[in-house]
Image: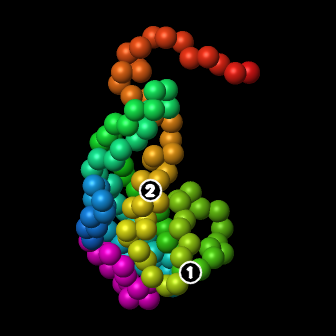
Amino acid sequence: MKIEFRKVSTTPKEFINDFASVKLEGTFCKMSPTLIKIDALLTGKTPVTCIRCGEEENINLNEKLNFLISDGIFKGNESEDLIIEIENGIIDFDEICESELSSLESDYHICKNCLEDNIEIEKEF
């Protein structure tokens, strides 16, 4: 789902975006001429790879996402929220989902079998 930045209103609008095996749903609204606030929940399943054995397993997602989208380079003061800068004036929710999934997949995951296995891992110092 794509939305033009300039068409977003100050009244919160609900959205649902299905991407691969996940769903992103929540609200978005314009906070200023260059910022949009998104409050959403990412749910579904995604495959991740165990760092110990290399096996792939699915994890259940239930991630709350709160962030701002800036039309162009963000030129504000420090913000506690994550800020996503867009260049072409188009908010692409598929791209946001893909980025979030890539971030989750790059984390360190240990599968259930390896958690139950008490063999020590060789450590390099």
Q: Nearer the viewer, residue 98 or 79?
A: 98
120 to 14, vertically: above or below: above
Number of residues whose C-alpha sits closer than 10 Å to that of mark 1, classed few (under 14), some (14–19) or many (20 or more)? few
Q: Is residue 60 magenta?
A: no
The residue at which mark 1 appears reads as: 87
Q: Nearer the viewer, residue 44 or 77?
A: 44
Q: Is residue 10 magenta?
A: yes
* Image point (62%, 73%), residue name: 74
Checking the image for residue 100, the label placed there is 2
Q: Which quadrant holds the C terminus? A: top right
Residue 40 percent location from the top left of the image = 34, 60
41 to 28, vertically: above or below: above
Q: Which quadrant holds the N terminus? A: bottom left
Q: Which residues are magenta?
A: 1-14
93 to 113, vertically: above or below: below
Number of residues whose C-alpha sits closer than 10 Å to that of mark 2, classed few (under 14), some (14–19) or many (20 or more)? some
SS of the residue under disc 2: helix
Q: Is residue 66 visible?
A: no
Residue type at mark 1? Glu
Residue 36 percent location from the top left of the image = 45, 75
Residue 14 percent location from the top left of the image = 26, 71
Q: Nearer the viewer, residue 50 or 90?
A: 50
Checking the image for residue 69, the label placed there is none
Residue type at mark 2? Glu
Return the residue found at the far front: 54
Q: Quadrant of residue 97?
A: bottom left
Q: Is residue 69 left or right of residue 60?
A: right
Rounded to the nearest whole Å, what is the CA distance between mark 1 and mark 2? Answer: 19 Å
* Image point (27%, 64%), residue name: 18
Q: Is residue 16 left or right of residue 109?
A: left
Compare marks 1 and 2 and give the one earlier in the sequence: 1
